[in-house]
Image (cartoon, grey):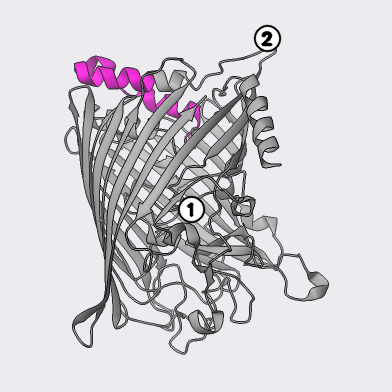
Amino acid sequence: MKKTILFLIALFLIVFPAFSGMDAYMIPLSSDIYKDMDALYLISGEGIPSFSRPWSSAEANIIFSRIDKSKLDENGIMLYSHVEKELKEMEPRWRFSDGFGLGAEIESNFEYYGHTNGEDFVIDDDWVYSYEDRKPFLKAGLEFSVKDFFYTYADLQYTMGRYQGEGAVKYDPDIDFPYGIGAIVGKDDDVTIVKESRQYYQSHSINLPIASKDFEFDWPKRALISLGGKNWNFTFGRDKISWGESIIGNFIIDDHVQYHDMTRLAFFTDMFKYEWTNLFFETLLHPESGDAGKEREIRMLIAHRLEFRPSSWINLAISENVMYRAPTLNLKYLNPAFILHNLNNASMFNAIAQAELTIQPVKGLKIYGQFVLDQARAPNEGDSQADAWGVLAGIGYTSMMKKGYLSSGIEFAYTTPLLYRRHTVDFLMYQRSFTYDLDGSTMKLYYIGFPYGGDAIVLKGNLYYRMPGIFETGISIEGMLHGEMDMFKSHNSGNDNNENTDIKDSTPYGNRILESLKVSLYGKYEFPKWWKEMDMYAFAQISFFGRDYYEKTTGCATEKEADIQWVLGLGIKI
């Protein structure tokens, strides 16, 4: 059966060449055009492009049109030409006379993973190159468009699932989260969360499922329809989304989540962008047998964002957002122009606001920051709930070097213990993964925004050199302190997740503080094309991951653990 499926996929996709729409085509976040456009902006003195992503091809062309080619030096012109070529390749390659376009792509990625400590590093979060980073062994995509205004895409894949049931260890709810998990899992809910899984604790593993029960059933990972014009776009479907330029993680919507189910409406000009986004989340099934299979409620993020570019050297964005939770959807709450904070119903809504600022004082240099406010005491409010907020700041520099560019950056982030946590409506989410031998669906937990959630102090730096279309190499270093306030910890001083978030303490909270250090060195080489429709690459990464727990009462570090991890990859795309 497995061989038959693979043969049919390959046969179907080889028949059609790849196709992309024009105005409505959505550029996936995995595209290198984002790195190259960011670099082109910095070396040209144009500040930074929009960090509300992904872009449609129409928006990307507006962004690209701001660059004055005549002001670039020889190396800058090389980068300009490469970005221009990338944009042109998004246009349809096979179009019919009536404006209909059709295409497909197929890619295969073989990845090998190894590490030295399979006793302590046993789950996807224990890997620097985690499951969200890993590429599928076989992936196929089908897309078509109508003229320039309609585009649709869907993919399918054959690869290792997130978890394997054989040899897996589950969390014990009575011990590990006896009070539930935030506001999304009650203490009496029956859920399965994996604590250890084979492919992560094995010394060596690959992304090819040998047994059919290890196959990843959760696909498509990307499936959407897009309608668009020169200055607008509407998208409905599943895709990765990101708001902000942080190298650690953005506060409202971040791309560390493998995908979001969403609708997005965006309008953009040379100086302004408005975006209205709704993210839809999974909820637990109703426990009563009479309602088996019915979801208990609706959970969604309603978000709108305004981005201003008053001059070439400054970019300002503000967003106002609410998490919505109710048995049914009331359409009146979807007013995209409403002041969302004034949906003043704590049993249904939790508001969060964010501001972003990026400036470019000189060519090549950017200074940026984000601030997020989840909870603050108003003049007439009581102090039954703790303040919750986060801040990050960073600086980066990019310069041309021979036929490529060198980029560097350093960033600091701080979040208070109860950021994203509320007793009725919070900013936690999960996605299901079907896993044999573990009662079917397992739960993967995420923070919607900042990957480490609240109670974190993080410092990260990176340096990389890239020659577009040829090779890239880089190094990153990340250090973190994280208090005891994780998803499994109750946000209430009385250990009742149905009560207020009243733990008023500074970061890092608690006695047992996680200290971690991650260092990664990677390289990627793109082989010369011997056929214009085919891309091939080789990839390697080696990482050090060390951690321990510092106890405030004793002043000593315990549970010292370290792992050397490596990844080798080879890919081909047609």
For numbered disc 2, what is the local secondary structure? loop
- Above or below for 251 versus 538: below
Residue span colored magenta: 55-84
User: Residue at horizontal 28%, vertical 44%?
Assistant: 358
Expressed as whole percent of the image width and height from the top left, the position of residue 453 reads: 40, 65
Residue for badge 2: 97
Q: Is residue 571 visible?
A: yes
Expressed as whole percent of the image width and height from the top left, the position of residue 336 reads: 57, 49
- Above or below for 267 versus 420: above
Residue for badge 1: 257
The quadrant holding residue 40 is: top left
Report the magenta stretch's main SS: helix
Rounded to the nearest whole Å, what is the CA distance between mark 1 and mark 2? 40 Å
- The crowding category of the residue bearing disc 2, from other C-alpha atoms within 10 Å (few below 14, some 14 to 19, many at least 20), is few
- Most distant residue in the top direction: 97
The quadrant holding residue 392 is: bottom left
